[in-house]
Amino acid sequence: MSALLVISFCLWSLDRGLEITDEAYYLLLGMHPDAVKLYISAQQWVTGPLWQVTGSLMSFRAAGMVLLMASAALLAIGATSALRQTPLPSADDLGGRSRVIAASLVGALLYAATINLSPCYNLLASAGAYAAAGLLLLSLRTDDRWRRTGLLLLVGIALAVEFVSKPSSGVATLCLLAFWLLVAGQSLPRKMIGLASVLAGFACGAFALAVTQTTIADARLALSQGMELFRMVQVEPVGARLTRYLVEFCRHSIDAVEAFAVVILAVSLYLLTRRLIFAGLAILSLLYTLVSGRYLLGGVDQYVLQMQAAFVLFLLGLLVALPVCKADRRTGAIVAGLALLPYTVAVGTGNAIFTQVIVSLAPWGVALALLAAGDFPRKADKVLAMTLCAAFVATVAAQIISSGFRAPYHLQAPLIAQSQAVTVGELGSVRVDPETANFVSKLQLAAGTCGIVSGAPFLGLYNIPGVALVLETVPLSTPWLNNVAQADAVLTRAPPGILGSSVVALLLNADGSRPELPAALESFPAGFEYCGEATYPFGSQRIQIWSSRAS
């Protein structure tokens, strides 16, 4: 039931909201992959073909939803298959398999509580990791040499998709799956052949994605110059970032333990004494904490609380259920891998890694559902394990659905208030709030005032790529411009005279003044015609549109 409700919510949300920063960046990469000359993630090699197939915002988001759901289901099927004939009985019957798949789907779709489902580096990294893990787990149960080799080649291809979308995640997931293969495999030669098959699939997949979209030389140049842009914004050294991950993880973990202290104490006392009163206290205190602590709510201001609840429920589920895993290396490796997989997807983020795993929790749902299906020595143990699993799924489902009624990422109004249909260029029909509808209308009026033509070069200063979507223009070299140093770098590499046919959008400062302009625009507004101004409701962002007089 939880999975059906979550899927229904996600379908309902597919045409709602027009966000002009992160999602707009993902959309522009997919819509104009050939125009992207600077990047640190080659996600457009995947999203470009997806946009060609879909061709509208709603369909593009639907494709992202399908990718997440299909890969999460594959992960659930693979894990269920791999745990057959181990000390941990897997859910072999249809009902049991359905529960594992449902838990995986709900965990995967928590992504939708953070931002809509347009395919991007985070979504593709999650889907690639789920698919790779599921395929590898399926291969562990296959005796046929050729079928196993084929599955492992597909594992490598899925990892290639993850790697080109988010390189740090691809490398981390590859290391985790290599550990799975070496620990849970059979003879050493078979393990080595399996690892070689994965690496071959990885190399072939990455090469195929590259050569079908660009040339190797162009890709190397784009990545090199893209890293220069990236370092102008992200200056944190790798060592410092890893240290910050650890410090933040410890701090958030301690906060989570403190918030759920009564629940943790009750579960611990039950496991020590096996007294039913403590099991009952654990369930009652868990329900009270989830409700009173607002852990059932989603929204942009709830990420830490959402992950505190998921983290504690997952750890308690492991604590209660792990005794059913008798001394078996394969079972321990699979459960440990499922616990760590969200973190391999999160590696490389500039955010706190504790909260970043919110976009990749399908493995936790799979692990809890499989453990809860195990044979327990006591009925009360099984009831408590099933309760914790159900609480995890229900809590995540509630967070997803409630996010539609609360503040979303970089939008002024909740999705429930995004009900007015507007047409936004190639995106097609989008439901927005009245203030955003007015924003779109004024941008389209500005485009008409200056006769801005579809496909004109666009320079957005700064971090307003979504304006290009409304104006139907194409960003110069990259949609990602956050500061004047990046703009200088882009314009230095741009074709000579490109500004003579460009559209410039300026996000005004809070006092109404213009932002700092790149050196190539030192004589601005000379040579440009003022087209109009519109205010994006989130943060009351005033944006001016100027068009080159030559264009």
Image (spheres, helix red, strand yellow):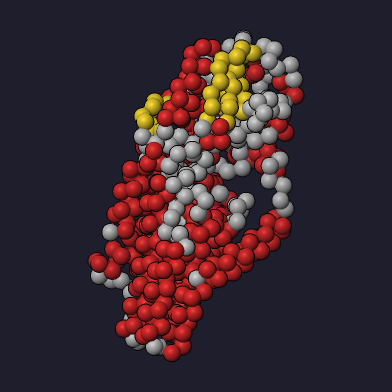
Left or right: 536 as drawn, with respect to 247: left
Q: Nearer the viewer, residue 497 or 223?
A: 497
Residue furthest to the front in view is 292
Question: Can I make out residue 445 in this image?
Answer: yes
Q: Quadrant of residue 289?
A: bottom left
Q: Quadrant of the N terminus?
A: bottom left
Residue furthest to the top in view is 550
Q: Where 2 sits versus 20, above or below?
A: below
Residue furthest to the bottom in view is 273
Q: Quadrant of residue 546?
A: top right
Q: Nearer the viewer, residue 389 or 481?
A: 389
Q: Where 261 sits versus 448, above or below?
A: below
- Residue at the spot x=51%, y=32% of the render? 537
Counting the numbered discs, the total is 0
Q: Quadrant of the C terminus?
A: top right
Q: Nearer the viewer, residue 441 or 71?
A: 441
- Residue at the spot x=38%, y=57% of the render? 398
Residue furthest to the left in view is 94
- Residue at the spot x=72%, y=47% of the render? 235
- Residue 106 horizontal/vertical position (percent): 37, 57
- Residue 172 horizontal/vertical position (percent): 57, 59
Question: Can I make out residue 131 in this image?
Answer: no
- Residue at the spot x=62%, y=9% of the render? 550
Q: Where 537 sits versus 352, above or below?
A: above
- Residue 26 horizontal/vertical position (percent): 51, 38
- Residue 167 horizontal/vertical position (percent): 58, 50
